[in-house]
Image (cartoon, coloured by chain):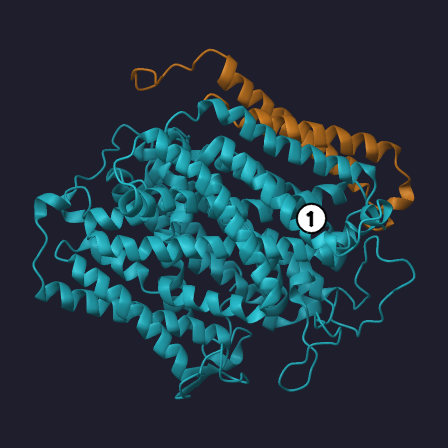
Chain colours: A cyan, B orange
Amino acid sequence: MGLTTIDWVIMAVYFAFVLGIGAALKRYMKTSADFFLAGRSIPAWVCGLAFISANLGAQEVIGMGASGAKYGILTSHFYWIGAIPAMVFVGIFMMPFYYGSRARSVPEYLRLRFDEKTRGLNAISFATMTIFSSGISMYAMAKLIQTLHFLDAPFRHFGIPQAWIFHTGIIVSALVVLTYIYLGGLTSAIYNEVLQFFLIVAGFIPLVWLGLKNVGGWSGLQAALGPSYMHSWVGLGSPHTNRLGVEWFGLTMGLGFVLSFGYWCTDFLVVQRAMAADSMASARRTPLIAAVPKMLFPLLVILPGLIAIALPRQPPPILNGPQGSAVAAPAGQGLIPVKLDATTGQPVLDNSGHPQLDYDLAVPNLLLHYFPTGILGLGLTALLASFMSGMAGNVTAFNTVWTHDIYEPYIRPNAGDAHYLMMGRLATIFGIALSIAGAYLATRFNNIMDMLQLVFAFVNAPLFATFLLGMFWKRATGHGAFMGLLSGTLAAAVHHALTIPAEAIPGVKGGWLSVLHTYPSEMAQNFWTAIFAWTTCFVVTILVSLVTTAPEESRLVGLVYSLTERPQEGNLGWYKRPGYLGAVILGATVLLNFIFR
Amino acid sequence: MGLDIRLPIGMIFTIFGIMLIVFGVFSNPALYAQSLGININLIWGLVLLAFGAVMLFLGARAMFGPRPADPQGREPRH
C-alpha cells in the first residue's frame, strides 16, 4: 500500500485551485469592506456552506470520528440537540441585529448595544482564542502527516531528514492559507471553504459506503457493537447507563442550550460568514441553509468512527512506512491502535491500568484501510481541506477583530480606509505567524493547550446570556453585561476548581481548590461548568442592570428586539422565509432524534 | 463578486473525475482487493465528473448567460 503519482497529482491540483481562487479574487479587493466583509455581496447558499465549512476543521472531522468510536451514536447530540436548534435560532432571531445593525463584527455589536469595555473584553479574548485554535489545527495537521507516514517516502528519496516532516506540514499549510487570505480576504476564505466542503463530502461518502458495506450495513454495525453504541437517547435517564456519563438534563441544558447556542450564535468565526451575505434575507437564510447539510453530517463524520471500532481487530494500516520496521504495537480495538506515549513509545495507561486507545486515528486509519491509490489522494485531500478550512476561518475572524475592534479603536483611530485594508493584510501575516508559534508551543507543552482550552471554555460559557439579554431585554446595561461576563467566567473557574470527573487526578482536570463533587465523566463536568457560568452571568447581568442607569431607547433602535422593526419578507416564496425554513429543519431534526433514539 | 464559485468547483471536480476514471480503467484490478473488489476509482470518478459537469453548467449559465428575468420585477442588481 502506498501513494503513487496520481495521489500526488490530485493533491497538487487541489493546492493550485486554492491558490488560484485567491489570485483570481485579488483584483476585487479595493476597500476594507471587500476584504473583511466580502463587500456584503455573497449569495446565501455560498455563505451557508462556508458557515458550516469554517467549523469543519480538524476538531470536527477527526474529533467527531474519534467520539463516534468512543461514545457511539450519542455523539450525534452535538448536532441534533446542539448545533441545529442553535443555528435555527441565530438565523431567525439574532441575525436581524447582527446584519441590521451594520456592525462589522460581533464585538462591534457589543459596543453598539452595551459599551466600550464589554467590546474590549470580548475582542481581546476572542482574538487570543482564534490564534490558538488555528495553532492547534496546524499542529494537529502536521502531527497527522507525521503519524500517517505519507511524506516519509518522498523525504527519504530526496535525502531530507524525517524530523523535517512536521516542520514542512506546518510551514506549507501556513503559507497556503496565508497566500489565499492575503490576496482575496474573506471572499477567498469563503470560496475556498465552499470548495473544501464539497471535497470533504466527496472524500467521505465513498468511505462510509465501503465501510458500511463491509460491516454488513446498519444491522451489521448493531450486531458488532451492541446497543450501548447504537442509541442516542436510550440510557440517558442516568449518567451511569450511557457511554457519555451524562444525564438528559445536563446534556440538553449544558450542551444543547448553553454551549451550542454560545458557539453558533455568538462566535464571530461563523457569524462573519452570514454577515458577508448580499442582503438581510440572505444573512438570515445562511445558518438555515447551513443546517440542512449539518443535520446529515453525523452520517459522514460519526459513522466512520463506529465502523473503525466495529471491524475485526487488525494491525493498523501503514502507509509507506519505514521498511522492515513493523512496530509490534499492542492490539487495540478494530482499526484503532493503542495510544503510545510520544516520548517513551510505551502504551499510555488509564487510572485502572488499561491501555488507552488512540481514537483520533479512527478516521485516518479507515481511509488507509479502504482507499486504494487514486481515490486515496482524494481522501487525503479531503483531510487536508478540512484542516485548512478550520485554520482559515480563524485567521479571517482574527484579522477582522484585530483591525476593527483592537487596532482601530485603541491603537490608531481615524486612519483612512486604505490604511485599515493594509492592516488587515498585515494582521493576516502576523496572525499566522502567531499561530505557528502556538503550534510549536503545543509540541513543547502538552498541558499548555489543555489549560488554554479550559480558559477559553470559562470565557465562552457565559457569553450567550449576555447576547440573549442584550438582544431581547432593552433594560440590560453596559455595566450589567460587563459584570455578568466577568462573574460568569469566574463562576466557571470556581465550579471547575471544586469538582472533578471520576478517576481523574486534581489539576488541569478540575478539583484544584478542593473536591466538593465528583462527576461520572469529564463531559458531565464540562456541561455543568457551562450551566453554572451561564446562570451566574444571566442573574448578575439582570441585577447589575437594574441598579444602573437604563440606556436611552433611541440608541437601541436596530439593536434590541422590542425596538426594531420586523424584517419584511412578504415578497419571498415560503421556501425563502426563515420562519418556515426553521420549522421544517426543526421538524426534520426531531425526526432524526426519534429514528436514532 | 465577479467570480462565480461554481466554475472553479466544477473545474476541479471534472479534472478529478476524469483522472479517477482513466486511472480506474487502466489500473491493475488487484488494487481493488482493498476496496471490497469494487473499482472505486472508476465508480467514484464517474460521480465526481457528473457533479463537476453540473456545477460547470450552472456556473457558466450564471456568469455568461442572459440574466434570468426577475420575478418580482425589481431593478437588477449591479
- Left or right of A76? Residue A534 is left
| Whether residue A20 can be seen here | yes
**Residue under the point 43% across and 26% down:** A29
**Where is residue A473, by image quadrant?**
bottom left
Mark 1: which secondary structure? helix
Q: Residue flagged by tag 1: what amino acid is it?
A: Thr
Quadrant in the rendering for residue A277: top left
How crowded pointer 1 is (Cα within 10 Å; few <14, some 14-19, many 20+) is rated as some
Q: Residue A221's quadrant in the figure?
A: bottom right
Is A132 on the left or on the right of A217, as rendered?
Answer: left
Q: Residue at x 79, y 35 (%)?
A: B42
- The disc numbered 1 marks a residue on which chain? A
Question: Residue, x 50% and y 42% (percent of image)?
Answer: A429
Asked whether the viewer can see residue A40, the reply is no
For label 1, the residue is A168
Q: Position of residue A81 (x, y in %)?
A: 43, 60
A292 relative to A154 in the view: left or right: left
Specify whether B35 is left or right of A118.
right
Q: A527 or A441, which is in the foreground?
A: A441
